[in-house]
Image (cartoon, helix red, strand yellow):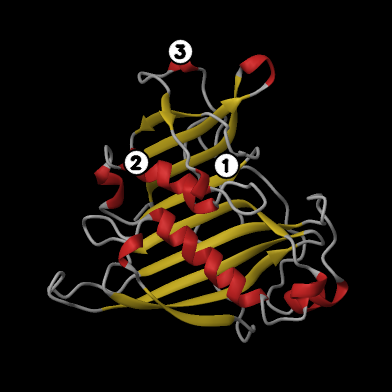
Amino acid sequence: MPLPTPTSEFAPEYAPLTDRKPGAEFFAETYRVRTGDIDQEMRVRLDGLARYLQDIANDNIAPMEYAATDPFWIVRRTVIDVLEPITWPADFVAERWCGALSTRWTDMRVRLRAQSQTNKFNPEPRPNGLVETVAFWINVNEQGMPSRISDDMYEFLCTMTDEHRLRWRSMNPDAPALAELALPDREHVLRITDFDPFKHLNNAAYLEAVEDELVSHPDLLDVPHRMVIEYLRPITPGTPIMLRRKRIDDCLYVWMMIPGDDDELVTAAAISVFHIPP
């Protein structure tokens, strides 16, 4: 996925996500929007979209033989382009395929196409939702270290894309010093239910914190927008979280900060939400 060079430290990067290779195999499943994933405007929240991405990844890999040879993956980054919001009530089709890869990681594309419906709580017709996503997945071993994708799975994924030399490059800027910000850091409280059996913070829980911030920036959701989250350090149960925020023009940056050496705060996750250029 080629990206332009940013014009300044805090200029968001944008390039449309690449489409599926003609004739490439892909996995598809139909889901139903649930009320637990929507906000007061009936919009599927970012954390709800993150749960959908986890669901289709699990449903995609579970019946495949690669569930035994390549069972462990971690997400390093997720990009979500909300081109038309998915709203409730609706059914949606999720399509998943490999958009690029190397020997240890992949860009997994997921397209969500919703068929909007009406009911007594949301009776007005609405546009059908469309969300495009890509996630940078790293294959790891039982110790959590990056590991080569098995030969059979690598060969299978290669049939979906002609990009076989995927490289990592960060899309979000580093957190600024607190003195550079107009707002103080804000505490964000995590719950034990935010963690999975491996004591990893669930991907959706990160975006619940972002939704808390977007309440003060509703204009960012009024037009097509992109969210980019990069997971930089693990967050384990009991870790105190501080949110560092910066709004520049049509972009909101949020950094999840945790104690590092000598209790100095370090960045655990960097997030940006910004308007997609027309």
Type of amino acid under label 1:
Thr
Type of amino acid under label 2:
Asp
Image vertical order of residue 185 relative to residue 78, above or below: above
Comparing 178 with 169, the one in front is 178
> Which residue is rendered at x = 61% and y = 55% of the image?
2
> Which residue is rendered at x = 78% and y = 68% of the image?
70
Secondary structure of residue under mark 1: loop
Mark 3 or mark 2: which comes first in sequence?
A: 3
User: Which mark, by number, is residue 5?
Assistant: 1
- Count of numbered badges drawn on the protein: 3
Comparing 125 with 69, the one in front is 69
Q: Residues within 10 Å of mark 1 (few under 14, many from 20)?
A: few
Tell me the distance, in whole angstroms, between the alpha carbons under discs 2 and 1: 30 Å
User: Which mark, by number, is residue 179?
Assistant: 3
* Quarter assignment of residue 100: bottom right
User: Which mark, by number, is residue 212?
Assistant: 2
